[in-house]
Amino acid sequence: MITRELIKDVTITLLRRAETTLPSDVKAALVRAYEREEHEIARVQVEVMLENVKLAEELQRPLCQDTGLPLFSVKLGSGTVNLSDIESGIRAGVKEATEAIPLRPNVVDAITREGGEANVGNKMPYIDYTIADIDGLELMAFPKGGGSENVSAFTMLAPQSEEEATNEIKKFVLEAVLNAAGRPCPPTIIGIGVGGTADIAMKLAKVALLRPVGVRNTEARIARFEEELFEAVNNTGIGPMGLGGKTTALDVHIETVATHITSLPVAVTFQCWAARKSAAKIYSDGRVEYL
């Protein structure tokens, strides 16, 4: 049975794993970046990142002082589960994890800037729900750092031919990368959302960040565009931490959805090199599998 207490405990474990252990796909990408770098300062920067990853795992301490905004994704499947138990369980887990791990208290009121004691606030932690054909539910923790979030970009392009649209999207993405420079702590993972409405495009960009490094979009023409943008971004020379080099991004991911005949929304979001995420499947009988 899926209970509030179980969800709380899983939330704490997910946050601990996400904050202290970098996913294997990201670690492998950093190693590749180190091996291909020729710029001396860039190699030193990536080497420090890899050492930081090693120490964080050994000491079970956060990878970065900015432990992020507590964002969660929930896939709801079959079986009885009370939505209020999910929300209160995650909220209680975040509050306890803030002290136990510990996490920096990042959550404040958007206007007054007050609060922040336990990373809980108005509608925060934020939970995104989707429906899936699974038993029980899947829960993902996705702590999002402020530095990378603050350089997010959005535009509404004019509808045009495929070739023109592709060129305009590429131009906008590169402008966003150049404007961000070293602020999102590169090498980054870049998520791009195209289509829908303004809010849907930005959500798609976030979803794109969750795809493993090196995994291409299932649609061949979008996959080719990802490769083209990936090469272009790394040719900017921004490099690790904005200090120059061949690796500005670990990957570029694009997610698309159909849109209105008069619209072409495009959103770009960044994830820093410490691309933290952790997920678990909670079966309807109460079993937990960490993914």
Image (cartoon, grey):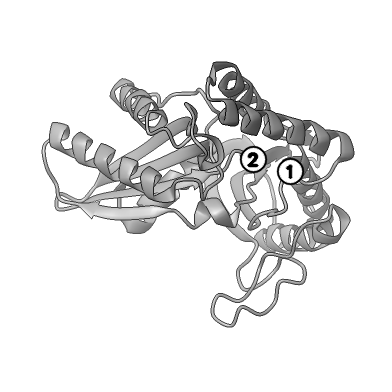
Name the outermost residue toward the bottom: 112
Q: What residue do we see at 79% from left, 63% from top?
A: 95
Q: Which residue is mark 1?
A: 63
Left or right, 256 with respect to 56, comes to left
The secondary element bearing badge 1 is classed as loop
Q: What residue do we see at 66% from left, 27% from top?
A: 27
| Neighbours of disc 1 within 10 Å: few (<14), some (14-19), many (20+) | many
Q: What residue do we see at 84% from left, 52% from top?
A: 101
Q: Which is nearer the eye, 19 or 38?
A: 38
Q: Is residue 26 above or below residue 266?
A: above
Q: Which residue is mark 2?
A: 274
Q: Which is nearer the eye, 175 or 82?
A: 175
Closer to the chain start, of discs 1 and 2, is: 1
Q: Is residue 77 above or below residue 251?
A: below
Q: Which is nearer the eye, 166 or 94?
A: 166
Q: Residue 65: x percent and y percent?
A: 72, 53
Left or right, 242 with respect to 265, comes to right
Left or right, 176 with respect to 136, comes to left
The secondary element bearing badge 2 is classed as loop
Q: Is residue 265 above or below residue 251?
A: below
Check disc 1 and give the amino acid type: Leu
Check disc 2 and give the amino acid type: Ala
